[in-house]
Image (cartoon, grey):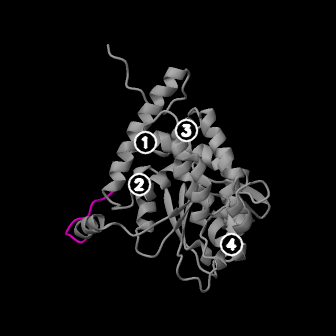
Amino acid sequence: MSAPEPTFANPPATTSDIIAKIEALGQRLSLVRERIGRVIFGQTEVVDQSLITLLGGGHALLIGVPGLAKTKLVETLGVVLGLEEKRLQCTPDLMPADILGSEVLEESETGRRSFRFIKGPVFTQLLMADEINRASPRTQSALLQAMQERRVSVAGAYHPLPAPFHVLATQNPLEQEGTYPLPEAQLDRFLLQVDVSYPDLASERKMLIATTGAEEEKPQAVMTADELIAAQALIRRVPVGESVVEAILKLVRSGRPDETDNAEVKKHVAWGPGPRASQALMLATRARAVLDGRLAPSVDDVVALAQPILRHRMALNFGARADGVTMNKVIDGLCAPLA
């Protein structure tokens, strides 16, 4: 009788068991990518970074001009990963209660009055916050609590959010009138900032033909919510070599003006990444390795993820903007000694 095929749903017991489960997860994730690729065209890096965010148990900020399938990507991820998905359109008049929910006073047939909590759209497993920077600071702070604590507070009572809980927020980089820039504390809660660019010519041609015909490809489920939770737990068991740990610490600490010897950082960076950036790199490099079918991350993973993890956790000073220095250029300079 042959041994059963290894899965990643049950907690691993031994080192060989961990290896078998990591390999099984990598095979399942290759199928996830293939199914998403049938619906989302020419955004391979965006899809991979979104999957890395979910495998790391975090939230992602998707930045791109309208029409680049950001909404469709979130809907597809929800279906393929078996997650309950809701969409929230952020506007300046959106109130915290519109996101979290509220208590209403009800009267029973006997005349007894009591409060009942009605859950808002945040009570889901995958929340798309469309144009998050159009919400007021008060509303953004309510969402921040949900993102960080995985629970909300209404009328002095805490209500836990479903597991898993992820926020994929979008932001339009062009139209800034009537927007409220996200505070640094909230930006730091996003595991990755994913920049969504235009597809290449071949992908746009394929998308044009596939989406304007009589029938359009529909996403299909590959995983369940429980399997995603198991995958997130397994990602944290992936071993990380000392060279990768040192590369993460060197990269993050070299981005802080008060701690670095990098002349460009001292001259152009107002403030650098905090310890949460190091934690994000540790989780994301593990997830990227498994997504690529490897058993452990490498320094190349650190370099590849430096941009999406650091660019929203650092700020340029006025002199840098006057000199035309970009954050991408600064981060590339930080990565140069690691390459």
Q: Are marks 4 and 2 in contact (CB under 8 Å)?
A: no
Residue for badge 2? 79
83 vs 333, nearest the viewer: 333
- For residue 235, the mark is 3
311 vs 161, nearest the viewer: 311
Residue 253 lies, in percent from the top left, at 72, 51
Examine the rendered structure and indicate whether residue 319 appears above or below residue 122: below
Helix, strand or loop status at disc 2: helix
Q: Earlier in the sequence, mark 1 or mark 3?
A: 3
Front of the two marks 1 and 2: 1
Q: Is residue 190 magenta?
A: no
Give the Cα distance between marks 3 and 4.
32 Å
Q: Is residue 216 magenta?
A: yes
Taking the spot 39% from the left edge, 56% from the top edge, the residue there is 44
Q: Are marks 3 and 2 in contact (CB under 8 Å)?
A: no
Residue for badge 4? 139
Residue 21 lies, in percent from the top left, at 47, 30
Taking the spot 66% from the left edge, 64% from the top edge, the residue there is 187
